[in-house]
Image (cartoon, grey):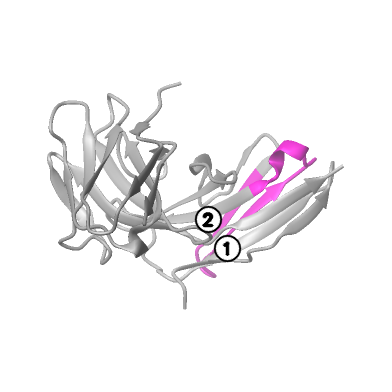
């Protein structure tokens, strides 16, 4: 079964440092997403990406965050100047299209710990 | 009011029993509805989409009530492997999924 691949699985970084989280979506999917889940809390939407541009973003996705699809396969989330409260599990997801007939496939996540 | 609200549980269920739980959503413009399953510290995995007419997938039955803005999930003949957190997920116009906080189900022998 096709899967979304995320690397690294765990990243520890010092407060103020920049991190890049990497994702390889499913190859025939056109929509890409980043979500995050702070420990013990619900999954929260960060950003959606389609046709090489951001299609929607949440209030969480401020100037500290950026996304990029640098080539035909990778989809990255960059967090500049990390804060302690950025510690969370970050999930990448992709979908072929949108709507009830198109479930999203999530990657196994990157656990980001900011110290 | 939370966008998607769920009873956090846990629902303690004897193996072989039936369990059902609901979720309510606040955005009447919501268009697509899903149940996802999440195991501890793992990614959400799509369990099933929820259609207006209600739908069934093996031991799982989902219902949607648009008038009252709630979705339900019923699990029949519970297995130990059904122990997980069940996430109610709603999609309005656009691509964004809005997650509930999850309902924890523990199936015990």
- The reply to whether the magenta stretch includes residue A21 is no
Foreground pick, B1 / B38: B38
Q: Is residue A87 left or right of residue B79?
A: left
Q: Which mark is residue B88?
A: 2
**Callout 2: SS:** strand
**Callout 1: SS:** strand
Q: Which mark is residue B23?
A: 1
Residue, x 18% and y 54% (percent of image)? A80
Q: Is residue B58 left or right of residue A76?
A: right
Pick whichever of labels 2 and 1 is earlier in the sequence.
Answer: 1
Write down the region rendered in magenta. Answer: B61-84
Counting from the top left corner in percent of width and height, residue B47 is at 55, 40
Counting from the top left corner in percent of width and height, residue B85 is at 61, 51
Counting from the top left corner in percent of width and height, residue A26 is at 32, 27
Residue, x 41% and y 39% (percent of image)? A106
Foreground pick, A43 / B79: A43
- The reply to whether the magenta stretch includes residue B71 is yes
Check the residue under mark 2 and report the chain it is in. Answer: B
Q: Is residue B74 left or right of residue A35?
A: right
Vertical position of residue A32 compared to residue A56: above or below = above
Q: Which mark is residue A58?
A: none
Within the image, what quadrant is residue B72 found in? bottom right
Residue, x 31% and y 33% (percent of image)? A96
Near mark 1 (Cα within 10 A), the count class, few <14, some 14-19 or many ≥20, is many
Residues under labels 2 and 1: Cα distance?
Answer: 6 Å
Tell which residue pokes out farthest to the bottom in this image.
Answer: B1
Foreground pick, A25 / A115: A115
Vertical position of residue A72 compared to residue A62: above or below = above
Counting from the top left corner in percent of width and height, residue B43 is at 48, 42
Q: Are marks 2 and 1 in contact (CB under 8 Å)?
A: yes
Near mark 2 (Cα within 10 A), the count class, few <14, some 14-19 or many ≥20, is many
């Amino acid at each position: 079964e096709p899967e979304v691949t995320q690397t690294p699985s765990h990243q520890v970084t010092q407060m103020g440092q920049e991190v890049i989280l990497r994702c390889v979506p499913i190859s025939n999917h056109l929509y890409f997403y980043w979500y995050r889940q702070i420990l013990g809390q619900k999954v929260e939407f960060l950003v959606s990406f389609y046709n090489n541009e951001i299609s929607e973003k949440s209030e969480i996705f401020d100037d500290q965050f950026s996304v990029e699809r640098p080539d035909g396969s990778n989809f990255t989330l960059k967090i500049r100047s990390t804060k302690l409260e950025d510690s969370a599990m970050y999930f990448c997801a992709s979908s072929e299209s949108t709507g009830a007939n198109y479930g999203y496939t999530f990657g196994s996540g990157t656990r980001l710990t900011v110290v | 009011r939370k966008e998607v609200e769920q009873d956090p549980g846990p629902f303690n269920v004897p193996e072989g029993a039936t369990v059902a739980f609901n979720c309510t959503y606040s955005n009447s413009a919501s268009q697509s509805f899903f149940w996802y399953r999440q195991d501890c510290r793992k990614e959400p995995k799509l369990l099933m989409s929820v259609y207006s007419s209600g739908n069934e997938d093996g031991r799982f039955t989902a219902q949607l009530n648009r008038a009252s803005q709630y979705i339900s999930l019923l699990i029949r003949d519970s297995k130990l492997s059904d122990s997980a957190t069940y996430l109610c997920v709603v999609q309005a116009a656009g691509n964004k999924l809005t997650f509930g906080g999850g309902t924890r189900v523990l199936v015990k022998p």
